[in-house]
């Protein structure tokens, strides 16, 4: 792992940092994710920047902002999910693979409070060898 961080704050509630992180391997839910990079600014309730993973069973690029510090949280980002094998990632016992692109620009605390746009396109869901969507 290579990482650099510069910021302010002495505890988890007021920290704000500029991050540049490259992780060769991180095990989550029993799966060893590889080639993760994070470049952005983070605080306890906000992230602005780019997150990319180029693992053999998960590849995506997130670019944007998630900010839940305000009364009305804001979400403005693009998530390009190039592919995820949910079985190999230990999320399901079924052979399910997904991909798609999500672009969001909205505010709101929950489903009843959302105002803005969410665009989901190029969705592909495959179970075993059957294309579901």
Image (tube, helix red, strand yellow):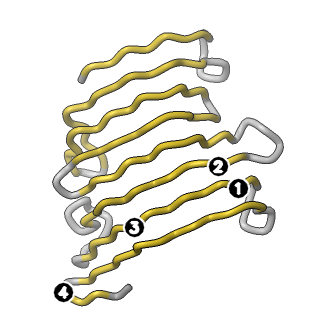
Assess whether mark 2 and mark 1 are in contact (beta carbons under 8 angstroms): yes
**Which residue is denoted by mark 1 in the rendering?**
106
Question: Which residue is under mark 3?
Answer: 100
Counting every numbered tag in the picture gives 4
* Sooner in the amino-acid sequence: mark 1 or mark 3: 3
Task: Return the residue at label 2.
Answer: 75
At mark 4, the secondary structure is loop
Mark 2 or mark 3, which has the lower sequence index?
Answer: 2
Tell me: 32 left or right of 120. left
Secondary structure under tag 3 reads strand
Q: Nearer the viewer, residue 41 or 93?
A: 41
Helix, strand or loop for disc 2: strand
Q: CA separation, marks 1 and 2?
A: 5 Å
| Residue visible at 38% across and 48% down in the picture | 61
Is 21 located above or below residue 51 in the figure?
Answer: above
Q: Are marks 4 and 1 in contact (CB under 8 Å)?
A: no
Q: Position of residue 24 (x, y in %)?
A: 20, 32
Between discs 4 and 1, the one toward the N terminus: 1
């Amino acid at each position: 792992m290579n990482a650099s961080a510069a910021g302010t704050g002495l505890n988890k509630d007021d920290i704000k940092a500029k991050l540049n992180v490259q992780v060769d391997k991180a095990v989550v839910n029993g799966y060893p994710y590889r080639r993760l990079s994070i470049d952005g600014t983070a605080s306890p309730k906000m992230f602005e920047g780019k997150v990319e993973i180029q693992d053999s069973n998960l590849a995506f690029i997130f670019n944007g902002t998630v900010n839940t510090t305000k009364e009305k949280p804001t979400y403005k980002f693009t998530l390009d999910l190039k592919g995820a094998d949910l079985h190999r990632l230990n999320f399901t016992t079924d052979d399910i693979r997904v991909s798609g692109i999500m672009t969001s620009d909205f505010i709101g605390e929950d489903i009843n409070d959302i105002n803005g746009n969410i665009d989901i396109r190029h969705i592909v869901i495959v179970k075993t060898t059957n294309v579901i969507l």
